[in-house]
Image (cartoon, rainbow, N blue to C red):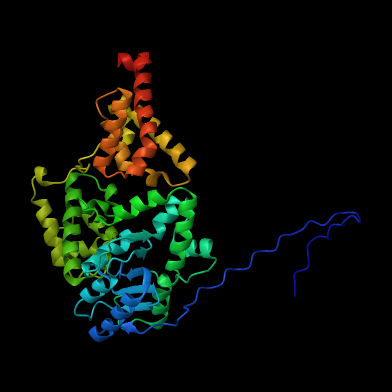
Amino acid sequence: MPDTPDTEPETVAADAVPVAVEPEAPPAPLLELRDGLPEVVETDARLAEACAALAAGTGPIAIDAERASGYRYSNRAYLIQLRREGAGTWLVDPIPLTTLAPLQEALGDAEWILHAATQDLPCLREVGLAPTSIFDTELAGRLLGYPRVGLATLVETVLGLRMRKEHSAADWSTRPLPKPWLDYAALDVEVLLELREHMVTELEKAGKAEWARQEFENLLGFEPAVRVDAWRRTSGVHRLRGRRALGAARALWEARDAIAAERDVTPGRILPDSAIVAAATAMPTDRRALLATQGFHGRGASRYSSTWVDALQRVREMSEDELPTRAPRGDGPPHPRTWAEREPVADRRFKAAREAMLNLAEVHHLPVENLLTPDYLRRLMWTPPETREPAGLAEAVRAQLASYGARPWQAELITGALVGAILGAEAQTETDPVDAEE
């Protein structure tokens, strides 16, 4: 029974005009598998059937891979999903198969449709699969200015269908894979073909088809960045004081990483970052003190205690020169927040260029980081070409951007704005008496 209101209802005038209330839009229908759930391919004989079907299909191939991020150290693919017109959907388990070379041959030079290709390309290459052309639906969404470009959001926005996402963080190294997980995996390629067709049309209407072509071609050479001093990404390491504490964090991180790689377990499941920071802060000298350290916990805290103690002992014996410095060494310019004091002219160039880039991104309806990689902008504004003759400067800016990896469409779109930022900032410096005295 509904609650009784605390006050009397308001009296409505007889001549009051009722306000129309817009009905809520019905929820989008849930995406379902059109052909039912296929049997997982886990034998070489079954793989041959899949290859024959995919080779006989037509048009591009939707492809996706499931990894065990958060559970395994490796980035290997534990399930590969493929769908092609005329071939249906195939779920391939690469773990028990002898080779995937027949699958690569069956795919031939067909275009691959992926969502967030940079996430899947490395693990697919690891099992011998590589595309000759790509259409990335996430990247297309960015170029088209969609505010959210997750697959489920794009499918609902563009196709009007809801997707299930409850198994995105599952441990895909589990065997056998549960049926609900397989349903989820198959759905990830169910609508990629249709989504691509819609986005191709949108890109052409927006005049961005060539931008997308260049971006997709660039993806073919994608390689994951090699992290320098990866231990510095340990959560909480910024709270450590002194180079020896930093050295302890590095030593513990490296010891943990070696164990994780050997066991193929994600490092955080052996020892959390918080435990590394706690031990690096306390610097205990023996096992008992280590295990008594507040905050030092984890599945491998006691099991590998001798490894952790040995790592800390090595750090105590290091000379000052062997210990890491607070600031990481890099080949790029310093962080822009330091430019105003160190290089005021570069600071002016960067701020003017950043504002120009934000304006261009707004005009063309795309994220500013897709207009130009932020690191490229920092490098260019820190060390611009020497010439200040406008035409020569524009040519040199284009060349410098290309050397960093910028695509031709980006350079064409932004060179004028960047030349204006360089010349404008430096002209302002010449007329600023304070800067002149400095």
Q: Residue placed at 26% from the left, 82% from the top?
A: 48
**Total numbered circles:** 0
Q: Is residue 254 left or right of residue 54?
A: left
Image quarter where the N terminus lies is bottom right
Q: Nearer the viewer, residue 256 or 352?
A: 352
Q: Nearer the viewer, residue 251 or 288?
A: 251
State the residue at coordinates (33%, 80%).
Answer: 53
Residue at 35% x, 34% y is: 415
Residue 301 visible in the shown view: no
| Image: 174 above or below 152 | below
Question: Is residue 166 depicted above or below 158 in this figure?
Answer: below
- Residue at image x 48%, y 46%? 365
Residue 218 % position (x, y): 29, 52
Give the vertical position of 362 relative to 202 (above or below).
above
Percent position (x, y) of residue 329?
A: 19, 42
x and y percent of residue 216 in the render?
34, 55
- Residue 109, percent from left and from top: 28, 65
